[in-house]
Amino acid sequence: MSRVRNGPRRRLAGRRRRGARPGFTLLELVVALGVGALALLAARSALVQIAGAADVALAAARVVDREANAERLLRATVGQLETGVQPARAFAGDARAATFATWCDTPSNQHVPCRARLASDSADGRPVLTLTLTVAGRPDTVVLRRATRSVTLRYLTTPEAGGRWVPSWPPAITPPLALGVISDADTLILRIGARG
């Protein structure tokens, strides 16, 4: 008799062991997928923020690079200004613009004669300083500086006693000693050629 009693118990215990499969229940699987989705969303959000910060840093670096290159271009253009040229290519300027003959660098690293126009213009409703270089009849304009209120040009006639600056320069073979660019409260003084 004892055999009969132990027989069904053993069979029942065997069924329980066979019925308890290793693995996850459906609820555990749904919870794991939810946690994984939240982790992916958090990682995506962090990557978007990092990419945004990188874009801001890259834009700031481009502005600094453009401003540094713009001032270098302006100094080189004014520094290579041609003096004593024929009257048709003479230096002339007023508070808003100056035109003169100079030498420009080409992409093939050659110096070629060109015509330059440094001007106070407007872009997006704000005052800007532009430089237009015309080589072989093709003008190329670069925005050098952006201002909030105004951009004005001045011309140095004599360096004694702090210098005498005038608001205009009549067309002449002889250019001023220096060119002053006043943008808002900032003044940039550019020496002209070997004379300045």
Image (cartoon, helix red, strand yellow):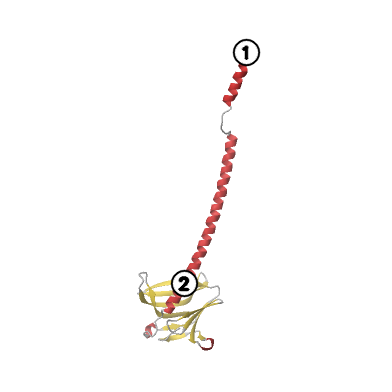
Residue 109 appears at what percent x and percent y? 36, 71
At mark 1, the secondary structure is helix
Q: Is 91 in front, or is 64?
A: 64
Quick one: label 2, few (<14), some, or many (20+) residues within 10 Å?
some
Labels 1 and 2: the sequence-earlier one = 1
Q: Quadrant of residue 141?
A: bottom left
Q: Quadrant of residue 35?
A: top right
Residue highlighted by disc 2: 70
Residue 190 appears at what percent x and percent y? 47, 79
Q: Residue at 54% x, 52% y: name it.
A: 47
Residue 49 appears at what percent x and percent y? 55, 55
Residue 164 appears at what percent x and percent y? 51, 87
Quick one: label 1, few (<14), some, or many (20+) residues within 10 Å?
few
Q: Is 90 in front, or is 13?
A: 13
Q: Amino acid at mark 1?
A: Arg
Which corner quadrant holds the N terminus? top right
Q: Quadrant of residue 32?
A: top right
Mark on residue 3? 1
Q: Amino acid at mark 2?
A: Ala
Q: Residue at 62% x, 18% y: name it.
A: 9
